[in-house]
Image (cartoon, helix red, strand yellow):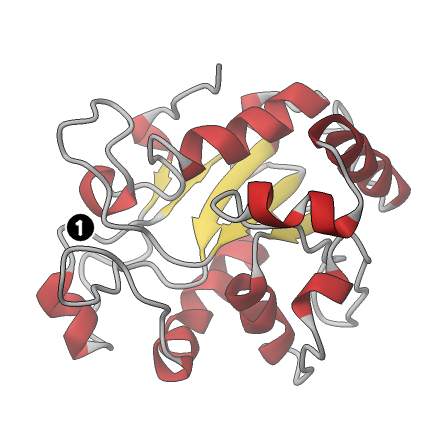
Amino acid sequence: MATFPDRDDRNVLAADCRRCPALVDDRNRISWGVGSTDATIVVVGEAPGAGDPNADPWAGGNHTGMAYTSRHSGRRIRNLFETIGYATGELYFTNAVKCFPADGSGSNREPTATERKNCRSHLLSELEAVDPACVVPTGKHATETLLSAVDRTLDGFLDSVLDPIRPEDLPPILPVLHPSYQDVWLGRLGYDPETYRSEIGDALVELGAAPGER
């Protein structure tokens, strides 16, 4: 099972943030990055989901204040990297957007381009502080946010999955599927879960981000 992070490992970049009024109104807590600032890999999600305050401890970032700590996506993505062989101290988890984007009916919507832009400086500050060997965005919006930071666009997300991107001003980027949609797309991309894990591990080794190197 995935390891729940130490709450003291939250990387709080600001006591408060009010750049996005709609997000301020709907969030419970800001979901800051969590993990070692010496990490080999930074895993970037889209934004915290609605979560479940009663799912202790995996209540979700909107309630825990820590990225990727939900019962479904959080446990799943953390378990993926731990299964590949990464110790918890080699991993740092964050989101492209730090606050829950509510859809008005209790669930979450996609963050807007403006919200992603407003939050990008937080993400870049994290990458500068951690200086990982590789950044692994999970899903389309996280990948687009990273590419926007280096004035690049994404032609098609599914075509980019497990296809390394080497920008000049950021660490290498390895896009992977968001854990919420993994079951839908794995088969369509020609993977089973075991092969997918293996391919991620091999790609990270190729990029100089093998387990145990830090």
Quarter of the image for the C terminus: give it: top right
Asked if residue 133 can be seen in this view, the reply is no
- Residue plotted at (73% across, 56% down): 161
What amino acid is found at the position of numbered circle 1 in the picture?
Arg
Q: Quadrant of residue 63?
A: top left
Question: What residue did someone put label 1 on?
Answer: 29
The residue positioned farthest toward the left in the image shown? 25
Q: Residue at x 41, y 74 (%)?
A: 116
Residue furthest out toward the top: 1
In the rendered image, the vertical position of residue 60 relative to residue 111, given as above or below:
above
Relative to residue 53, is residue 76 drawn left or right? right
Determine crowd level at label 1: few under 14, some 14-19, many 20+ residues with C-alpha closer than 10 A: some
Residue extending farthest right? 206
Foreground of the two, 28 or 188? 188
Front residue of 95 and 139? 139
Name the one closer to the observer, 25 or 6: 25
Q: Residue at x 41, y 64 (%)?
A: 122
Asked where in the image residue 65 lies, by quadrant, the reply is: top left
Q: Is residue 80 above or below residue 68?
A: above
The local secondary structure at tag 1 comes to loop
Residue plotted at (72% across, 71% down): 169
Residue 76 percent location from the top left of the image? 49, 31
**To which quarter of the image does residue 60 belong?**
top left
Residue 16 visible in the picture:
yes
**Position of residue 134 in the picture relative to residue 2 (left or right):** right
Q: Position of residue 38 (x, y in %)?
A: 59, 36
Q: Is residue 17 left or right of residue 34?
A: left
Q: Position of residue 142 (x, y in %)?
A: 53, 63
| Percent x, y of residue 55 | 21, 26
